[in-house]
C-alpha cells in the first residue's frame, strides 16, 4: 500500500490538477491526491505534517474515530445517513499538522474525477494542532474527457487552540457533474482561519452546506467567489456560530450569474459576549437569464454581539462600462475587467487556466445578453 | 492653416429628457487648446460628455466631427479609438480593478511606470481605480489615464478641483506635457479644458476660451483676457 501511494503522478494527472492549483511537490510540505474512489498519491516533505488515507488513520489512531463524524451528524439527512451506514471503508484524506509547527510551504490536496459517471464519496479530516501554522491549497477537478459524475464530500476541520490556517480552494467541475459538500470547521480558542474559495467553472448542481463554530477570540474569515454559467445551479447554505467571547468572522461572498442560478443563504449566530460578525453578499447578473437569491441572516444570542450584513445584486453599471470604453476598451474587454474586479481574482491566487476558463465564460454570458 | 480636429455644428443635447445644450458651434484645430468657462450647471460637463459619447447624453440636433469623421453616432470606445480621451470630473470607483490591470488592458505598462512617477502615483499599481482615492488622487489618475491612452484630443473636466497645493503644479505640468507633445503618429495633440480657477493657464498656453451660459456658448475669445473679465465682472458677456 505504501509503495503504491508514493508512485508519482503521471503527466495526464498533473495536467488535470494544474488547473486547480497543483504545483511541483518539492515546493510543498505535503501532497495528497484522491482519484475516483481511492487515495492515489501521497508525498510528505515536512515531518511535522502527517498525511494518511482516512481509513488508515482510523486504524492507526484511536482518537481519530472521535473526530470522524465529530461535526457532521450521521443522521443529518438521508444522503449522510447512507454514507455513515456504508459497510465500505471510508475514502478520504487525514491531514495532521503537529503542534507548534510553523510550516514554510503549503500543503496541497486534490480530488480528481477520472472516470465518466463516477460517484465519488469522500470523507476528509484535517487537524491543525495547538499553535501550528499551515497553508493549505485544495483543488477539485475532472479529467479532460469527463463531463458527468457525482462528487459528495464530507470535510471536517479542527483548528486547535492558537492554530492558524490559510486555505485556498479551487474547483473545476464540468457541465453535468453534481456536487455536494458538507464542510464543518471547529475553530478553537485563539485559532484563526483565512479561507478563500473559487467556484467559477461549469457544474450542474452544486450544494455546499457549511457550518463553522468559532471559539474564544478565534477568527474565521472567508471569501468566496462564485460564477454560475448557463445550466449551473449553485446552492450555498452557511452558518457561522460565534460561540466564544470575542469570536470574530467576516464572510464575503461575490456571486456572478451568467445565465445560471445562485441561491446563497448565510447566517451568523452571535453567542459569545463581544463577538463580531459581518456578512457581505454581492451579486452581479450578466444577462436576463438565470437568477441570484441572496439571504443574509443575523441571529444574536448574546446582548453583546455585534453583527452586521450588506447585500446587493445588480447588473454591470452602464456608467462603469462607459468609463472604461471611453479609454478605448470595447464592451467585452470592459465587462471582463469589471467582472474580474468584482470577483477580485488576483493573478497570484488564480491558476492561469482557471482564469482563462472564466474569462471565456464571461464573454459567452455577455454575448448571450446582447 | 492647420486641420480641424473637432467640429461641432448646431449641436443640441438632452440628458434625462432635459435639454442641456443648445445649438453649439465649436471648432478646434490640431495643436490647439481651448478653455471652457461658465457657472455651475451651464452645461460644460454635458458638452464634454456628449463629445465623448457617454450614454447619459443624446445628441438631438447637429453633428460632431472628429478629424473629419462624423462621430455623434459612435460608441465611446469607437471615439476613443479615433483618439478622443477624457479626464472625468467624478469618475466611478471600480472595485477590484487595479490601475495595473487597466494599464495591462491598454498595453501601456511602459507609459504607466514613467508617468505614474511624474504624477506621484508610483505606488498605486495595485490600488483599485478611484477606490478610496482623495480628490487630488482622482484627478492625477485621470490625467495618467490619458497618457496611457495616448489620446490625440483630450478633454479635462475641472482638473484642478480637489487637488492640494503640493500637487497642483504636478497636475498642471502633466497637462502641459500632454498637450505640448505629439502623439505616436507625430500629430500635435489638442484639448478642451473646463476650469474654474484658471490655474491651468499658468501651465499651458490656451489658444482660445469659450464662455458657456444656459447650455449655449455665448462668447469666445482669448483665454487670459476672458478669464480676467470673469474674475472682475462675473459670467457676463464682455462688451465688444
Image: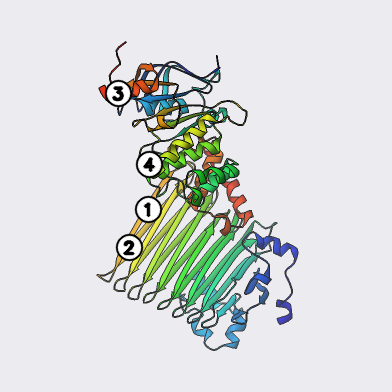
Q: Quadrant of the N terminus of chain B?
A: top right
Residue found at x 30% / y 29%: B40
Residue B168 percent across, percent down from the top left? 40, 40
Q: Is residue B126 above or below residue A94?
A: above
Give the mark nearest the N terminus, 1 or 2. Answer: 2
Q: Secondary structure at mark 3?
A: helix
In the foreground, A312 or B61: B61
Left or right relative to A149: residue A237? left
Q: Residues within 10 Å of mark 4 (few under 14, many from 20)?
A: some
* Distance Cα–Cα, label 3 vs label 1: 48 Å
Residue found at x 65% / y 56%: A147
Label 3 chain ID:
B
Residue bearing the label numbered 2: A298
Q: Residue A311, labelled with which disc?
A: 1
Q: Residue B230, labelled with which disc?
A: 3
Residue found at x 62% / y 62%: A21
Q: Identify the residue at the far top of this view.
A: B240
Instruction: Using the rendered image of the protein, determine whether residue A321 is visible from the camera's viewpoint.
Output: no
* Callouts 1 and 2 close, C-beta under 8 Å: no
Marks 3 and 1: which is nearer the front?
3
* Distance Cα–Cα, label 3 vs label 2: 58 Å
Label 4 chain ID:
B
Residue B147 percent across, percent down from the top left? 53, 37
Residue bearing the label numbered 4: B163
Q: Secondary structure at mark 1?
A: strand
Q: Secondary structure at mark 4?
A: loop
Left or right relative to A253: residue A347? right
Label 2 chain ID:
A
Amino acid at each position: 500500500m505504501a509503495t503504491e501511494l508514493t508512485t508519482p503522478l503521471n503527466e495526464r494527472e498533473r495536467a488535470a490538477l494544474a488547473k486547480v492549483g497543483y504545483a511541483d511537490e518539492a515546493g510543498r510540505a505535503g501532497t495528497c491526491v484522491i482519484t475516483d474512489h481511492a487515495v492515489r498519491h501521497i508525498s510528505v516533505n515536512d515531518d511535522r505534517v502527517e498525511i494518511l488515507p482516512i481509513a488508515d488513520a482510523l486504524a492507526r489512531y484511536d482518537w481519530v474515530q472521535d473526530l470522524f463524524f465529530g461535526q457532521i451528524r450521521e443522521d443529518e439527512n438521508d444522503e449522510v445517513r447512507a454514507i455513515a451506514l456504508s459497510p465500505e471503508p471510508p475514502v478520504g484524506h487525514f491531514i495532521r499538522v503537529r503542534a507548534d509547527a510553523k510550516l514554510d510551504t503549503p500543503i496541497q490536496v486534490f480530488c480528481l474525477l477520472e472516470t465518466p459517471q463516477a460517484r465519488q464519496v469522500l470523507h476528509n479530516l484535517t487537524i491543525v494542532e495547538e499553535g501550528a501554522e499551515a497553508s493549505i491549497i485544495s483543488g477539485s477537478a475532472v479529467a479532460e474527457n469527463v463531463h458527468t459524475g457525482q462528487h459528495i464530500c464530507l470535510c471536517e476541520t479542527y483548528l486547535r487552540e492558537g492554530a492558524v490556517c490559510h486555505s485556498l480552494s479551487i474547483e473545476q467541475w464540468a457541465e453535468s457533474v453534481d456536487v455536494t459538500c458538507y464542510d464543518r470547521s471547529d475553530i478553537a480558542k485563539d485559532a484563526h482561519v483565512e479561507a478563500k474559495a473559487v467556484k467559477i467553472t461549469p457544474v450542474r448542481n452544486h450544494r455546499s452546506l457549511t457550518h463553522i463554530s468559532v471559539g474564544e477570540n478565534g477568527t474565521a474569515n472567508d471569501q468566496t467567489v462564485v460564477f454560475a454559467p448557463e445550466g449551473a445551479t449553485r446552492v450555498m447554505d452557511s452558518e457561522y456560530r460565534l460561540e466564544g467571547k470575542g469570536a470574530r468572522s467576516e464572510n464575503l461572498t461575490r456571486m456572478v450569474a451568467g445565465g445560471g442560478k445562485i441561491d446563497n443563504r448565510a447566517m451568523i449566530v452571535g453567542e459569545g459576549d463581544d463577538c463580531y460578525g459581518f456578512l457581505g453578499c454581492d451579486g452581479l447578473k450578466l444577462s436576463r437569464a438565470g437568477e441570484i437569491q441572496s439571504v443574509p441572516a443575523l441571529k444574536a444570542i448574546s446582548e453583546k454581539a455585534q453583527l452586521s450584513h450588506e447585500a446587493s445584486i445588480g447588473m454591470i453599471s452602464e456608467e462603469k462600462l462607459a468609463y472604461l470604453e471611453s479609454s478605448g476598451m470595447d464592451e467585452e474587454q470592459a465587462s471582463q475587467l469589471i467582472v474580474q474586479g468584482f470577483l477580485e481574482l488576483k493573478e497570484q491566487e488564480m491558476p492561469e487556466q482557471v482564469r482563462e476558463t472564466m474569462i471565456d465564460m464571461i464573454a459567452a454570458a455577455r454575448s448571450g445578453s446582447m | 492653416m492647420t486641420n480641424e480636429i473637432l467640429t461641432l455644428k448646431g449641436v443640441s443635447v438632452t440628458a434625462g429628457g432635459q435639454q442641456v445644450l443648445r445649438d453649439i458651434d465649436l471648432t478646434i484645430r490640431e495643436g490647439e487648446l481651448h478653455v471652457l468657462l461658465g457657472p455651475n450647471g451651464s452645461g460644460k460637463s454635458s458638452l464634454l460628455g456628449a463629445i465623448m459619447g457617454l450614454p447619459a447624453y443624446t445628441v438631438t440636433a447637429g453633428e460632431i466631427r472628429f478629424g473629419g469623421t462624423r462621430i455623434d453616432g459612435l460608441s465611446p470606445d469607437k471615439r476613443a479609438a479615433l483618439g478622443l480621451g477624457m479626464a472625468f470630473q467624478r469618475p466611478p470607483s471600480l472595485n477590484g480593478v487595479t490601475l495595473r490591470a487597466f494599464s495591462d488592458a491598454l498595453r501601456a505598462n511602459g507609459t504607466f511606470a514613467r508617468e505614474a512617477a511624474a504624477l506621484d502615483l508610483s505606488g498605486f499599481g495595485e490600488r483599485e481605480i478611484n477606490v478610496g482615492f482623495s480628490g487630488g488622487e482622482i484627478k492625477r489618475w485621470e490625467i495618467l489615464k490619458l497618457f496611457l491612452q495616448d489620446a490625440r484630443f483630450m478633454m479635462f473636466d475641472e482638473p484642478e478641483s480637489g487637488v492640494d497645493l503640493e500637487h497642483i503644479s504636478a497636475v498642471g505640468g502633466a497637462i502641459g506635457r500632454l498637450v505640448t507633445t505629439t502623439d505616436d503618429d507625430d500629430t500635435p495633440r489638442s484639448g478642451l479644458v473646463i476650469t474654474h480657477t484658471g490655474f491651468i493657464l499658468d501651465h499651458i498656453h490656451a489658444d482660445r476660451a469659450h464662455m458657456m451660459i444656459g447650455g449655449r456658448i455665448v462668447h469666445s475669445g482669448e483665454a487670459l483676457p476672458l478669464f480676467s473679465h470673469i474674475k472682475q465682472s462675473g459670467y457676463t458677456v464682455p462688451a465688444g
